[in-house]
Amino acid sequence: MGVTDVIERLPDAEGYRDPDPFAGPDHPMRKITRSIAFDTCDDDAETPWSPDRAVRVADLFDGLAAEWSERQVNADKAAPVNDALSRGNVDLDVDWLELGTGTGAGMRLLHGRVASLVATDLSSEMLLHAPDGLAPKVRADASMLPFVDDQFDAILLINMLLFPLEVDRVLRPNGVIVWVNTKGDQTPIHLPPRDVAAALPGEWNGVESRAGSGLWCVLRRSLPH
């Protein structure tokens, strides 16, 4: 597990408001999120992630795909992503990977703004409901990504499970991680920025803030001088 060096807290974006109550600390997905990030077992599994759990999670999101597609991206959900890209000192003209694209929220926001983009999801139905033509769509388990080491300059995760070793593996040494929870601490798949940094191998620093009714952080490895 990593060490948090410095995460600078920026002022909230204009118009930020606290999220409505939705998913507290006892929400099942909250527990799964933490157990996977920190490689600890929860009450329902011998390992934090397994083929059986992957199937169950894929089935869950397959069933939600049509509903999510209808909602697509609204301004409130887009706000923390756009704010991170604006105030997080993120280079857009590089190779991007979106993990857990769902029905294409991140694809829609990054399309036309980045040099290249690959979007992945565990759920085949989510990918079928995501728009075509915005980026290559790859069905993949984020615990074992089908990419070579150091392939991407930036990785976007919106309400996504964190698999620290794989994120670290496919990210280039000077790359960035953009972590977004669109409902802030009421997001079912939620980790505070400092826990994201702590779960990753090595030392990390960056910035964090809140926008819309969500939170974001941009993290970079603390490279030796």
Image (cartoon, rainbow, N blue to C red):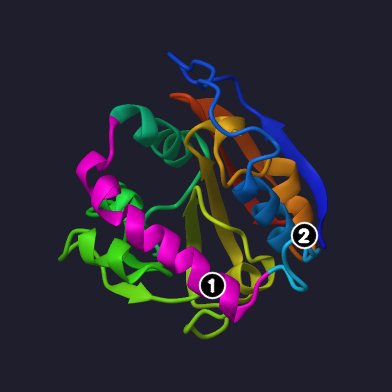
Q: Position of residue 101 (x, y in %)?
A: 38, 58
- Residue at coordinates 32% horizontally, 71% vertically from top-left? 124
Label whose residue precedes the other's in the sequence (2 or 1)? 2
**Which residue does the numbered mark 2 point to in the structure image?**
42
Cβ–Cβ under 8 Å for marks 2 and 1:
no
Quick check: 85 above or below 162?
A: above
- Identify the secondary structure beneath mark 1: helix
- Identify the secondary structure beneath mark 2: loop
- Residue at coordinates 62% horizontally, 32% vertically from top-left? 185
Is residue 26 or residue 106 the one in the foreground?
Answer: 26
- Amino acid at pointer 2: Asp
Q: Position of residue 109 (x, y in %)?
A: 30, 46
53 is within the stretch colored magenta: yes
Magenta segment boundaries in residue numbering: 49-74
- Residue at coordinates 72% horizontally, 39% vertically from top-left? 7
Is residue 20 or residue 216 the one in the foreground?
Answer: 20
Q: How far apart are marks 2 and 1 (CA)?
A: 15 Å
Count neighbours of disc 2 (C-alpha within 10 A) and say few if under 14, some if 14 to 19, many if 20 or more.
some
Q: Dividing the picture into quarters, in which one does residue 212 lie?
A: top left
**Which residue does the numbered mark 1 point to in the structure image?**
54
Judge whether residue 97 can be spotted in this image.
no
